[in-house]
Amino acid sequence: VLPESLQHQWLVEMLRRFNLKFAIFDDERCAAEAQDMDEGISPFNSEQQVLVSHEWLSQEGKWQNQLLSAEWDLVVVDEAHHITPQYQQHLDEGAERLFQAVKTVGQQTKGLVLLTATPDQLGHYGHFCRLQLLDPARFHDYDAFKQEENQYQVIAGIANKLLASQDLGGDDD
């Protein structure tokens, strides 16, 4: 699952670097695959490795539902910082649907990998939600996550002092 603008780059790189053949799926490809299959068979059964765009997956439709109900061994989401659910002023319905789709497929998949170089780009809450996609039991409450994170600030301050060989403010002995 990746931005549409990166689909062909991924297609080429996966083949060139890893000799893995991927197929790009969109509405047109799904319809073409469905014509060649028996009624009720998902077009996603025709390929082992598929690429779909964020934009396509964030739409509501028959093919998206079939993708979500297919069995996957591994789902990789590139540019995962774009997967941000609605929260307070953030009311992007497409982003909300994309988040819910990734959540759905992640819950029924053996492995979910989220790739991003900028996890906080669209906000701290979005970062928490992506962690929740990976481990919902561990990251179940945003307020608890913030409190726990604040405790790490104290530890980080101590670690920074140790790294800088500073006095920690204890006894002078």
Image: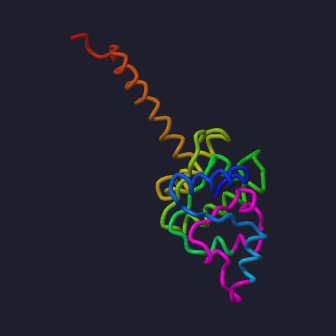
Which quarter of the rendered picture does the C terminus lie within?
top left
Q: Is residue 85 magenta?
A: no
Residue drawn at point x = 70 percent, y = 49 percent: 87
Residue 147: x, y in percent? 51, 40
Give the side of residue 109 with respect to residue 126, left or right. left
Residue 125 sits in quarter: top right
Total marks shown come to 0
Residue 25: x, y in percent? 70, 66
Q: How is the image coloured?
A: rainbow
**Can the viewer see residue 84?**
no
Q: Residue furthest top?
A: 172
Q: Is residue 114 above or below residue 67?
A: above
Q: Nearer the viewer, residue 17 or 81?
A: 17
Q: Is residue 37 magenta?
A: yes
Residue 10: x, y in percent? 62, 53
Residue drawn at point x = 73 percent, y = 81 percent: 34
Which region of the structure is painted magenta?
A: 36-65
Q: Is residue 146 above or below residue 48?
A: above
Residue drawn at point x = 33 percent, y = 17 percent: 168
Q: Is residue 44 above or below residue 150?
A: below
Q: Residue furthest left?
A: 173
Q: Nearer the viewer, residue 6 or 129?
A: 6
Q: Nearer the viewer, residue 142 or 101?
A: 101
